[in-house]
Structure formats: structure tokens, C-alpha cells
Image: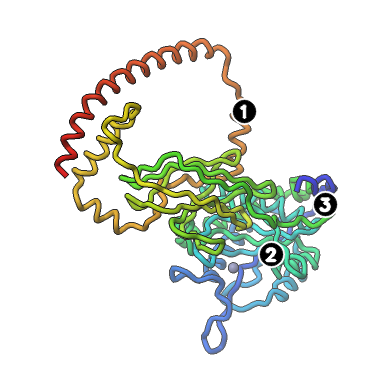
Amino acid sequence: MTALFALSFTVRANAAETVTVVIDPGHGGVSEDGSETNSGCRYHDLEEKNVNLTTAQAIYNELLQYGNVKVYLTRENDVEKTLDERVEFAKSVNADVIVSVHYNASAEHNFFGSEIFTSAYGECYATGHALAEHIMDKWVSEGNIRKDIKTRIGKKGDYYGLIRKGTEAGIPTIILEHGYLDNDRDYQRIRTEDAWRNFGILDATGIAEFYGLDKDVIRESVGPVDELKVPTDPVMPDSTEPTGVKLVIDDYNSNKGNVDFTLYAYDNESKLMYYGFRTGDVDKDTVFAELELWDGKNGKLSGSFHVQPGYEGKLTAKVYNVYQLDSLSNTVELVPDEEAPDDEEDNAVVPTEDENVDSYDTSGSESAADASEENDWVIGGSLPAVDTSAIANAIEHNTESKVQRSYTGLIIVSLIATITIVVAIVVSISTAADKRRGSKKDKKDLY
Ligand SMILES: [Zn+2]
């Protein structure tokens, strides 16, 4: 991608009196016998075509409050329109841009996040991508998860017919995939009509921002506020899987089924997006049904998750990039804890283990029954919905802000104090451990 931009030229798009925006609510239609013709994805009693229309109408209503803009909808109710008809309509009104409104679903219902597709070619890429960034910013500012702005190539060029036909007509065309209706991680946030309308307002705000429009203000001329970088070659989607996916188990507490792990993965071409775990045998086609957001830094992510208490066997991770290309990790064997022998000298974890055994015992057989009801690989510790680029920014930021030197003295003093305290604690723990080893022996005899 970087190399491509070296081969790009910059244009400042011509300003004009008005910007003409065609909003395209994806799908739609009921045939004469009452059967659906093109519903889009369906899930949770939702039909995508209806959700799309609600969002599209909200974009329309919101944009009309701005000056210097003409707005059209390719459909205003539940009718079928071919892609050709939609693009022909856009041509007939001299559209500057086509914004197609969609919601997503995936075959295994495991993906989540918001993504935008643009043409891979020339000025349609440049305009589409720059506009998409403004819209994506608005989405992310309200807690949506960035699945990035992408191109997709098929045999005929741009994969999506609307983008391909729009681009052929010289009209930058983008497809907004607001979120996944079939994945709870998105669905719980986007399932209401209010949420669909709110997306429309965010989309309109992003569009207005990109074209320099203001509410109730009429300017002499308006146009894209960004410098547009026009690539000389098609901007290709990533076609390679993440590399170097390695799973390391830092700690396995088999009593609780708690696995602390570090996962390594790299992708030079695109952002990493998800990771997940499976116990047992897996191969390339095994579905990893529960995915978490990859928020690792510098190719490394540490966390913890749960397996069935006492689980003994294989564990494998899978990591996906934003293009949904995935790689399996190495497979590790989880081995349940063994009781530490009484005469083991360097057994610093004995006090903690005793506590665990105690609390496990007091909760009785109920918790054991509950645990067996659970999936054998429930992923724990819900990760915050963060944008990976935001994290990258944060890292940059942190690197820039250096620790003030005046604190150095203070830090050294605190370090010395901490070390002294730690030494004192270690001494007292080892004394206590010696005592507890005796009591542990007694307890064992009760089983
Ligand atoms: Zn759709």
C-alpha cells in the first residue's frame, strides 16, 4: 500500500456550487405473489432491506439540513431495483457520489465490526477512500468497531457490481456495511430503529464533513476538504494470511479452567482483526465460533480465557486479519495441575493453591455441575471494543511523551522501598508455607 502511494498523484477536486449525493438503500423488493425478491441478510426477525431503508432515509433527512447539497434515494420503499437501474439513476442526476447502505452477516455468524468498501481504481478509489475515512471516524466515535476500509477484486475488476458499475460511470461509489446483524457483539448495539436512524445521522455527518458542508449555510462553492491521492495502479486487497501465529500458555489453573496466554501474530499488509480458541482437534476448516477483537500491540496479545475445569488436551488459536484471512497457531497440550509433593522445597505457590482448594470446596457440588454445563472453551474477559488504529495512535502518543526526568529520583526511591517490602513478604510467606504444608497433609487425608 505504501509503495502504491509513492506511485500516486495528488489532486484537489474541483469545487462546485452543489454536491449531488445519491443514497442507495441496498436490496429491496416483493414480487407479485408476495414473495421476497431481495431481502439482503436476515437474522433475528430482521430483514436487511428494511434496516437499510431506515438508515438511508435518515441520511437523506439529515443531509437536507445542510447547504450546497442535493440528495436522492435510489428507492423510497420496498421495491426491487437492479444495480444497473441504481447506477443509471445516479448518472441521470449527475451524482458526485453513490453511498450504498447495508448491514452485514457472515456464514458462521462469528464476525463483527463495521467496514466500508471502495473501488480499487484511480479517482474513484481516492474519493471513496477519503470519504469513507470521515464516515468511519463517526462510527468509531460511537463505539463501533473498525473492520477497516477495503477494496475487493473479482474477475471483472471491482468485486461488487454496484461499485464496478458506478466506477465505470465515473461516479465514486462506496458500500457501507454498518455492522453484523447476526453477531451479538454488534447486534446488541445496533438492533433498534433508533440505532439505524442514528447510523444515518453519522453517515450524513461524515459526508457533510468530507464535502465541507455546513448546516443551514450556503457557500459559494464546496468540495472535498482532503487532498485526494489517486493511485496509478489498482489498490489490491490483502491476499495473504497472518504469519507467525504462535500460542504460548503462561499459566493454566486447571481447578478454575483458567488459561493465561500470550498470542503472537503479524500481518504486514493489513490489520489483524480477531482471534479465537478451540480445544480438541482442529484443521484449517474448523469453525472458531466465538471470536474476540484483536487488540494486541506490536504483534503480541496477552489475556486469559476459560476451558472446562480439569480440561486435559489440545488447544489451538486462530487469528484473522480484516480481510477475514486466517491462520492457525501451533497446538499446545493443556495438562491439569498435579498436587505439589509435600517435600518440594521451591514450592512458592503452595499458599495460593491452598486458598483455591478451599474456595472451590466451599462452593460445593453446585458449581461443579454449573461448570460442566458450560461450553468447554468459553472465552473470558470481554475485551473493550477498541479501534486498532486508535491503539496504534495511542502507542505513538505514549512513545512521544517521555517520562519527565524530575521523576527519576522519586522512582528510584520507590523502587528501593518496594524491593524491601517484597523481600519482607517473601520471608514471611516461606515461613507460612512451611506451616501450611503440615495442615495440607491433614486435609488430604479427609478425601
Ligand atoms: Zn446487503
Camera-nearest residue between 222 and 401? 401
Mark 3 closeness class: few <14, some 14–19, many ≥20 residues within 10 Å: few
Q: What residue type is labelled 1?
A: Thr
Q: Nearer the viewer, mark 2 or mark 1?
A: 1
Camera-nearest residue between 427 and 399? 427
Dot placed on the residue nearer the N-terminal end, 2 or 1: 2
- Image quarter for residue 127? bottom right
Question: Which residue has dot 2 on it?
Answer: 22
Whether residues under marks 2 and 1 lie with C-beta atoms below 8 angstroms apart, the answer is no
Cα distance in 3D space between marks 2 and 1? 43 Å
- Whole-percent x, y for residue 24 in the image: 64, 67
Camera-nearest residue between 28 and 120? 120
- Whole-percent x, y for residue 65 in the image: 62, 55
Is disc 2's CB within 8 Å of ligand 1? no
Could you say whether the residue bearing mark 1 is in a helix, strand or loop?
Answer: helix
Question: Which residue has dot 1 on it?
Answer: 399
Considering only vertical position in the picture, is 405 above or below 329? above
- Whole-percent x, y for residue 349 in the image: 33, 31
Camera-nearest residue between 309 and 210? 309
Considering only vertical position in the picture, is 401 above or below 416? below
Considering only vertical position in the picture, is 52 above or below 392? below
Q: Which amino acid does label 2 sit on?
A: Val
Q: Is residue 385 in view? A: yes
Cα distance in 3D space between marks 2 and 3? 19 Å
Q: Nearer the viewer, mark 3 or mark 1?
A: 1
Could you say whether the residue bearing mark 2 is in a helix, strand or loop?
Answer: strand
